[in-house]
Amino acid sequence: MLNNQQTSSTKGNATMAPPISTSKSRPVPTILKVIRFAFGTVGRIAPDLAGRAAYKLWFTPTRFKTPASEYAVLVSAKIESHRINDETIVTYSWGQTGPIVLLVHGWSGRGTQLGNFVDPLIKAGYRVLSFDAPAHGKSSGKQTNLYIVADVILALQKHYGTFDSVITHSFGGPCIAVALQRGLLASRVINISPPATTKGLVDKFISTLNIPEKAGLNLIERIETTFGKKIWHEISMKNTVRGLNIPALVIHDDQDTDVPWQEGQIVAQSWDNARFVKTTGLGHRRILRDTTVIESAVNFIAVAA
């Protein structure tokens, strides 16, 4: 449900606060229990070894099976493969005419995850394009990162032409922000459940896996060795969106336990021309299936037509 009391973004300093959630705790998967035990044990005995394992895991998304709820949109798509930067990238497209709206999924997601937006966008006169990011879905690769995904988005623009608008979910937000910095063109951007800082994601990763302090510091050092110490500033969305004047809509749920809603608010406050909408009771993924959220997104795009 949309909270109409939270529909605008204001400039100023934003503060982080604990996520608000009234939902019941989900059971811990067995595989997560095993990983936690392994890091908790090895991380204390051999922090360098644990740090190296954590570094590899950090860049390795999980490929989930396509759920039955996405089958209809999957079979209705035109599926193509493109060779981009030595990887095979699978794209999905719908519609025959009209401007193109690009859908960008989040970490461990897939191109059909935002499938509920397809029919409403087509009915509004748009074509829709989505893709499986490297190491996701049906695309090739085992590991990836934000820069690689941003480069794929730019390559898709060269192939399909300029996108009218973009809709992102979670990790897709920072990817599109970097792509915009690198020359992506779009008239409107919608970010659903975006993280404000990359360091915050790493901290949650360390916390979720119960990685001991020394092993966690080893992981951070490895990332900084690869990408430089400025990496946390350079790819955190609250920084990469500064100076963008493309109209944007940021939607975030107050019961999102993956990325706290305050992070979406920070992104909106950092964007020169963004509006923030807070929903309630939808969490991090169900928000992609909510009819009111979808309608709001389509209306936001269509108003510029």
Image (tube, grey):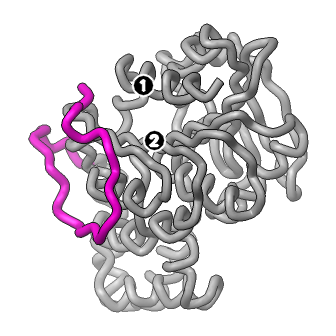
- Going by the numbered disc 1, the residue's amino acid type is Ser
Left or right: where 132 falls relative to 106 = right
Q: Which mark is residue 116?
A: none
- Going by the numbered disc 2, the residue's amino acid type is Leu
Circle 2 Cα neighbour tier, 10 Å, few/some/many (<14 / 14–19 / ≥20): many
Residue 24 visible here:
yes
What type of secondary structure mainly makes up the magenta span? loop
Could you tell me residue 135's position as x and y percent?
67, 51
Q: Are marks 1 and 2 in contact (CB under 8 Å)?
A: yes
Residue 209 visible here:
no
Could you tell me residue 189's position as x and y percent?
57, 42
The quadrant of the picture occupied by the C terminus is: top right
> Which of 91 and 165 lies nearest the eye of the viewer?
165
State the CA–CA distance, disc 1 to disc 2. 9 Å
Q: Which mark is residue 249?
A: 2
Q: In terms of image quadrants, where is residue 72?
A: top right
- The segment highlighted magenta reads 1-28
Q: Residue at x 86, y 58 (%)?
A: 85
Q: In terms of image quadrants, where is residue 138?
A: top right
Could you tell me residue 255's position as x and y percent?
21, 42
> Magenta stretch containing residue 177, yes or no?
no
Q: Residue at x 61, y 12 (%)?
A: 124
- Residue 291, compared with residue 8, is above or below; it is above
Secondary structure found at label 1:
helix
Could you tell me residue 237's position as x and y percent?
49, 64
Q: Which residue is mark 1?
A: 296
> Which of 124 and 88 lies nearest the eye of the viewer?
124
